[in-house]
Image: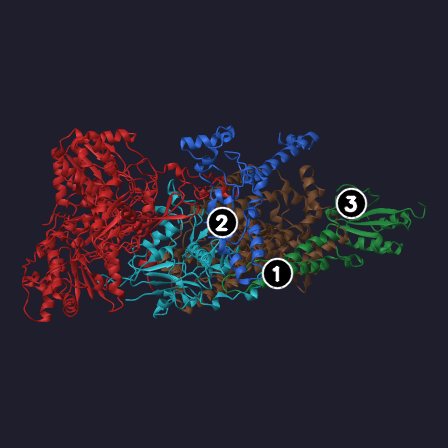
Chain colours: A cyan, B green, C red, D brown, E blue
Amino acid sequence: MIRPEEIKMSAEETGKWGMVINQDICTGCQACVAACAMENNVTFVGEEDSGYGRSMHWIRIERFWEGEYPEVKMTPNQPMLCQQCGSAPCEPVCPAFATVHSTAESLNLQVYNRCVGTRYCANNCPYQVRSFNWRDYERPEPLPNQFNPDVTVRRRGVMEKCTFCIQRIHKAQDKAKSEGREVADGEFTTACAQACPANAIVFGRVDNPQSLVSQLAHKGHGVKHLEELGTLPNVTYFKGG
Amino acid sequence: MTEENKVVDLLAVFSDLEPSADAVEQLRALGVRDECMNVISGVPVTEAMLGRPAQWTNVPRIAMGGAILGFAAGAFLAFGSPYQYPFPIQVNTHSFTPGPPSVVVLFELTMLGMLLSTFLGVFLDSFFPNYRPMKYVPEISDGKIAILVECSHVDEKKVTDALKKLGAESIAHVEAQHL
Amino acid sequence: MTEKFSRRDFLKLAGLGAATSAILTGCGPASRYVKREPYQQMPEYNYVGQNTYYATTCRECAAGCGLVVRTYQGRAIKTEGNANNPLNLGKTCARGQATLQGLYNPDRVQGPSTGDWDSAIQAVADALKNYKPNEIAFLMGMAPDHLFDLVSELASATGMNAPVRFGALGMFESRATLSKAAENLFGQAGLPWFDINGAEVVFSFGANFLETWLSPLPYTRGFVGLREGETKLRGAFVQFEARMSATGAKADHWVPVRPGTEGLVALAIGKLAAEARGGAMPRAFSSVNPADVAEQAGVELEALEELAAMFATRKVLAIPGGAALAQSNGLEVAEAVLALNALSDNFGQAGGVYLSGLAPMQTEYNRPASAQEMKSFVEKMKSGAFKVLFVHGVNPVFEVPASLGFKEALGSVEQVISFATFPDETAAEAKYVFPDHHGLESWGYQRVATGSDKPVLSGAQPVVSPYYDTRATADVLIAAAQLAGGKFAEALPFKDEVEFIETKVSALMAEADGSFSAADPVTFMAYFQQHGGWFKNVDARVSLDGSAVLNNNFKGSEAEFAGEGEFFFVPFVSPTMAEAGANKPWLQELADPTTTVMWNTWVEINPETAHELGLHDDDVVKVISEAGEVEAYVYLYPAIRPDTIAMPFGQGHTAYGRYAENRGANPADLLGAHFNEAGDITFGGMKVKVEKVKSAARGIGLSRLESTMGVYGDSLGEEH
Amino acid sequence: MADHKHDAGHAHSEEHFREKHLMLDPLPRGVMNDMVMESMTGKPTWKFWTVVIVLSAIVAYGLVYTWAKMIAEGLGIAGVNRPSYWGIFLVNTVFWIGISHAGTFISAILRVFKAEFRRPFTRAAELMTTFGLVQAGFSVFMHMGRVWLSYWLFPYPNQRMLWPNLHSPLTWDLLAITTYLLSSTMYLFLPLIPDVAMARDRSTGWRKSLYKVLALGFRGTEGEWAHLRNAMNIFAFAIIPVMFSVHTIVSWDFAAATRPGWNSTIFGPYFIVGALHSGMGAAVVVLAVIRSNMKHMDYFIRGEHFDAIGKLMLIISMAWAYFFFNDYMVQWYGGDKWTHQLLHFHEAGPLGWMWFGMLFCNIVVPWAILWNAKWRATPWLVSTVGLIINVGMWFERYIIVPISLTINRMPFTWRMYNPGAEIPLGIGTLALFILLYVLASKVIPLIPVWEVQEGQMAHELKKFGRETVVSVSELE
Amino acid sequence: MIKSFFNWLKQPLGLIAVGIVFLALFSAAAYGLYTTQQAPDQPIQFPHKTHVAFGIQCLYCHPGASKGPAAGIPSQAKCWACHNQIVKTRDSALLAPLKDAVLNGESLEWVPVAIVPDFVQFNHRAHVAAGKNCEECHGDMTQQLVAQNPQVMNMGWCLNCHIENAGEDQAKLIKLTDCGTCHY
């Protein structure tokens, strides 16, 4: 049996996996969004539902406007995805333990099996990055041939969100273990980071000060969104400019 | 069954509180013990009104027992169940047995246990549900007060006379019947 | 690697498709009801549960990015960039990611329209044989190159018309103008190559190089270098354009110049910068008066002076592109902007302008047909000079502006044979449709026209066996040529497409500095496939001599506009969908980078203008030009000139599968047949009218990812 | 009547008291029994059947069909979206739980404080509690994405070795609502036993069988009464904290969240007062409907009762206004920009009329009407006020749930909420509530005869000098 | 009318009828549940027992088990390669579906036997690498004809084994009982 007193609360740690996003060089090209959808079997929902706030993007690129024409300026593109909070507001409110903290990987997990669809977690997510399967969205044959077998295909009534490509984490760990070594920094990355033409997204171990992501994160002037809520997010943003 | 042991088994129906109370007194004077009398009424006539000894009821004790059981169930849920997991289910940075939520759980289950057992207590104490034949006349629910005398020591005639004198509307042997 | 898999080979793994099945709710695991089918012929290397990765080339546009496709049990699962390809260095754009939704699109052409391939090949052979060679024309897309080479060989050997290539992307990039400007200024045609990475400051005159322009991935990389270069300060970026593009959105300064005045602005900045520098005023700037230009362009003179000061003191790279070139004076704009680089001494050095080097197997730069050349092609069709038209890799009915009359001209061609993979508008008009494989099922190669400093030949190989009864067009042509016999058979003496490619590629073995070498052609081909192509480890960029460009005399003419309307019209290629993405549902559901609109076409109007016209978000308007009219929803776009409206190109299909059909509008329908001196269509030179058709109705309108409340403050009420 | 007016300052005649006070207008028990029985067993009129059929049709379409469709197709047919993940479902849940508070308030709190006017309508209010909770349960289960797995929310040992998450306010909700539903059903049933026994004694046929089973063999012996009285005392005291806990926990569903506008410490009492507000409003509507549609009910339910409830409504309305302002003031003063945005959106957003409507219905209307003793004693007027208060309280919940959900800390996701299947489902629950009530009125004695009789025993007129006053003896 | 029906129901005959209806409904429900727990028929009654008796190793036909998530089913070519050479089986009626499938280039539609619940990721490789033998989960194939699932493969079953394997090693236990190990 687990002895709870031996489990360190992740809040005391730095977290394990993290991301650095450089908004200054993000061009808003949506490659990350497409890559995420392809990797994680994220469904498309069609014009009507996507226009009604029901799109399933696990990562979305936000942008606002500053000033008035002709001095108008678009704010730096801000890819918004699950921040994998160390102290996540979504977790305690789920009555079924469908969204819990992974002690092993320091990630927010969404356990689809266990989800009964109360959507409380999504209400309580300050980043609004959770998407709910409002329907069984149709993916006509042969589109399902493309499904990634490493990732579950969700159906109606369950919540889903970015997993930091946990299937890739497992795969890399599995491979490293079979070769009797540790996972090397940069050995694998998430789908969004892999696709990003600008390398604006960098993923890796934040608890390893040698990793690229830690070094970038400590370069200074990085912000973590809504940190003041005590969520301990694991994604650092650089606005730049 | 001897003559002396002949059971007096009467149901006297009164239309008012005052004569019933008198009747209880009279009966007691005739040697009918309190245990042998029972007052049946359609409105809650208290024992004090009739000069009857207070009824013993287990309901509060059962309720207390239920509350303890409920508390125990709540304690199990709040402090036991998190340790039932073979795996560490951590949410947010909450501890496994967080304080305030445990208070809520304890409270709700205590109240649930108490109220359920109170309800149950009425059933236990009153032998509900009871669909066997019973001595009863429907007029009782019309507001009459009936005194049921089941006694083996007193003369039936004396009792009947006394009750009649006090204004009983009817005095009769009542066969137990399905209500 | 030439195993022939049949379609049955696909192993349909448990549960994935049927997990979505609604019927099974709550009745135990969905996977219970799924059948498993094994491989017919499982290759030994393909253990179940093992992923196999194939390097190939992306065919979503003609840039030639390398892909590595993960396949699992015979199905393509995920595309990633090929890190070995010097063009994209392991990265992909959204379209490259979504190419799988093309491969497994539910609306592909599933087989030859004649029913079987024997009769299809017979039909092609008949078409080749029964007409005079000069009555046969090929219209091809900008990819793939191997098929173009094959057809070119066939054409030159038999006297057929040389294949003509066209693509809407090329049209919207005004490639002919860029090439012509290079030729005029430097005496050498070709695509200019801008080293943004090494620049200190970038002045882009309409070039949307972060979206679809020429080769967006290397330019994005360049942009990162500009901003994040380790050895220098963060580079500045100024964009001159009437409508803020996704590229312009990343600029430090966005200068909304009036359409058609970009060249003047460039010259004025040049003049002011030269003044600030002191010394002799170059001849090139003599004709402009900055104060007049500022007024014509609708910008403050002070702003121009500030920019010029930047120009005078720092190393500035000036890039012409986009709608700036698609004006009646587009060629001069291109020349003026390119010439501006001479001020910063940008020619032939890092951070400057080069000419893209020739790709392997290329002896001279050949560009796709300009719109004007398409017009003469169409006229030949109309006149009956072409009796047979083969169409491959392009959807001209959709992509060629309607005013050029391609669709009508199709009626004058006796036999139109389409090799379309998808049931597009052209295929719908064709007599025969003999579907080619999807790009991921195909062999081939693609020359990288621009974007890499190295000469790159990206190689393509099938990553999965064809899903439908399709056949490689090269194979069809080879078979048909054999069947037609005579000089046709002689022209294509190949067993099949693969042999043709081997022949071509193995010629590279002799080249020095190759990315790999091999002793024999078989090994070389194997490496070629394994590496996803071949490149030469040399800097092939052509250094230009810009010493004399400022001595040119620029007229400083203003653009002329066609049509009566009150608005300038800026059509732009949808950055997420481009010309052929509309049938991929996930590309439809990607939010446009600037407007975040999904699944539809919109008209961008400045909020002030809209207010004057009584227009609101999601009103339907009719945009009327001299060439036609289209209807679309209004998007109040804060970053567009009040006298300009803009529309994205990519939607408005009447065919092309369920996700594209009858969705949005095609702004190419509004383009009149006007051309600049280089022959490119002046898509930026239209004037249009806007008429309100109906008001926004509740629940109907553009599907946006953004919140109009949060971003624009709609429905939030007046501020305290 | 004119005479009475004339005599207003002087001693009232006994008739006046009899007319005014049920408790001073005793009828023989048998007569009263007959009246109650007659009101219940009277042959159903065509009006009754029409109501039942229409309501059944609405329930069949709105609740059964729409819900089945929603289970089969997913919540997409409703209007919930990002960011309004909860819509009218939760509005209705809170609304129905609020309604359910009236019964407990009337029969427990008023019982504890020996407010004699409660006697004739405790049962009617208790029925509202139970049926209202049923609707609340429906509403909350409806909104679940995979309702067929809702049993996972209950604690029971299982092979997954999982228990529900006791950190979640929704789990507390489930525990609290379950507790409350069970307790209020029991509390409805206990005082019903003597009345059912009465009905058993004077009915035949299927009714006889039904009442026989329900009466459990109750005769009215001293012991039975004593146990019952004891149990009811325990219930009356214990159910009050349960009731408070239920709506407090419901308020924590919102207040415990990290959202602007929700994270408020005053939400607990604010919700409770709101619940009583709507509950009393609903109770008075139900009473007026019963009074005008059922035989003899004008004997049991009189102006004095409307007057008393009206007073309560007025006080509760004031309390509600106090809590509302308290919440508003603190949120407004706090200075968080998102909260400011939210408050502004409440008032000036597209549904600002709802915010003002809420204030009008919840404060202006009751204050304007209920201060007048004579108006207060006018059933139709008070019940209209009750109806308006319910509309206002529904608005309040709508403002708290979907409208407040619209504004969060990610402005890129703000979006309006347009209800879809929630509307038929909501109307379905309302219809089911009415239908259950209508059907129950045919089988359950709506008037607790024995309590009325008990009360009438305790009341008498007493003379102090020239003044005749009502005097109550404390029997218990 | 309705009343007479109810009266009839009170008769012994009526009570029997009610009983029968209830029994039928209950059986139908039970059968429905039962069928969800039973594997449908396989296209070929594949006798594992016989093959194992010949000394064929599990990994010969299911090589994926040691390589990745799915153990896989052998290609028909693999089956036919052997059976084609054995006279007895070449023309056996029992193997006719295989022969037809191979000759016509069609697929046999096998039905999954050992399945985990939806939304669960299972990796054979990790389990084989941890030293688990096939029969520990799939039962003793030397005793089985058509493969049967020896147990309900549910979460409790997985967890019991995981906990047992972790033993006193807390880090391993945390890893093996983490929700994210199987659910993603």
In the displayed structure, C298 sits above or below D31; it is: below
Q: In front here: D139 or C324?
A: C324
Q: Amino acid at mark 1?
A: Gly
* Secondary element type, mark 1: helix
Position of C112 with respect to E100 (left or right) is left
Residues behind callouts 2 and 3 on a single chain? no
| Mark-to-mark CA distance, 1 and 3 | 51 Å
Mark 1 packing: few (<14 Cα in 10 Å), some, or many (20+)?
A: some
Identify the residue under disc 3.
B136
Mark 2–mark 3 Cα distance, whole angstroms, equals 75 Å
Q: What is the three-letter code of the residue carrying label 2?
A: His
The residue singled out by tag 2 in the image is E124
Mark drawn on residue C396 = none
Label 1: which residue? B80
Q: Residue B174 is drawn in which quadrant?
A: top right
Q: Is residue B173 left or right of residue C488?
A: right
Q: Mark 1 or mark 2: which is in front?
A: 2
